[in-house]
Amino acid sequence: GQNIDQPTEMTATEGAIVQINCTYQTSGFNGLFWYQQHAGEAPTFLSYNVLDGLEEKGRFSSFLSRSKGYSYLLLKELQMKDSASYLCAASDNYGQNFVFGPGTRLSVLP
Amino acid sequence: KAGVTQTPRYLIKTRGQQVTLSCSPISGHRSVSWYQQTPGQGLQFLFEYFSETQRNKGNFPGRFSGRQFSNSRSEMNVSTLELGDSALYLCASSLAAPNYGYTFGSGTRLTVV
């Protein structure tokens, strides 16, 4: 089976750093994705990790540990516009089956 | 280049009716996936099409069906609508398989009354 877990809600202050964790259990694994979704809008791609380690893209970084079934998304220098839901998703061995986590709703406060 | 286009954006239907939603993927993208998103369940996978063939299917009843045309455009159909079918239906396209990265459409908001 496939199961992805992430916190439901998080709150942080503008300018701070926040880490959103994701744990996954899948029958096969081919990569871990992070998406951002603002209320009422479509999810947009943030990052993709297939190998262990940290991938940095500007203010956003994503980390993966395949042996631990664990990933996190790190957001630095938080801005009000970062208030959104962050979705973790894992793809299976063939890259065709995608399972999304429930999403973490991040609220950035002034 | 144009993004993923879903029509209509909003739809209100009555219980028992049927509905067809449309998705035009990004030009060149051959894989199209459909998801249902509700506040309680999050994003739930419906099915994925590639070259007019359904490659994968999620755990939804047979009332939910889809198809893909030779130009990669896709439609999904829900028959005998139930109140619980009210949701945002999202279509996503990718080059060959979802692990190349999805691009999502803006979705169709379906309300069943």
Image (cartoon, rainbow, N blue to C red):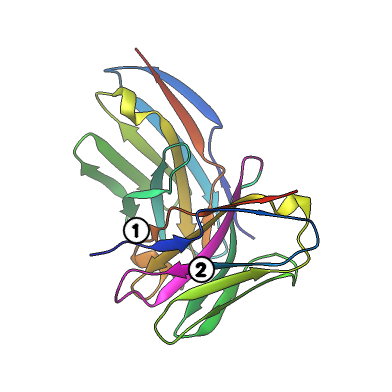
On screen, residue B80 versus residue A2, left or right, reads right
Is residue A65 visible to the viewer in this orientation of the structure?
Answer: no
Q: Chain of mark 1?
A: A
User: Where residue A86 sits in the image (x, y, percent)?
Assistant: 44, 39
- Whether B46 is drawn above or below A83: the answer is below
Is residue B103 visible to the viewer in this orientation of the structure?
Answer: yes
User: Where residue A88 sits in the image (x, y, percent)?
Assistant: 46, 46
Residue drawn at x 64%, y 66% is: B58
Please tell me whether mark 1 sits on a helix, a strand or a loop. Answer: loop
On screen, residue B37 versus residue B15, left or right, reads left
In the current view of this chain or complex, which residue is farthest to the left? A58
In the rendered structure, does residue A81 fall within the stretch colored magenta? no
Foreground of the two, B41 or B17: B17
Disc 1 from disc 2: Cα separation: 32 Å
Residue type, numbered disc 1: Val
Residue drawn at x 34%, y 30% is: A82
Residue drawn at x 59%, y 70% is: B76
Identify the disc placed on residue A50: 1
User: Where residue B71 sits in the image (x, y, percent)?
Assistant: 39, 83
Foreground of the two, A66 or A44: A44
Q: Chain of mark 2?
A: B
Q: Which residue is mark 2?
A: B22
User: Where residue A7 sits in the image (x, y, percent)?
Assistant: 54, 32
Please tell me whether mark 2 sits on a helix, a strand or a loop. Answer: strand
Quadrant location, the N terminus of chain B: bottom left
Q: Please state which of the two labelled residues, at mark 1 or mark 2, is closer to the viewer.
A: 2
Mark 1: give few (<14), some (14-19) or many (20+) Cα within 10 Å: some
Identify the disc placed on residue A3: none
The segment highlighted magenta reads B22-40
Residue type, numbered disc 2: Ser
Residue drawn at x 34%, y 74% is: B29
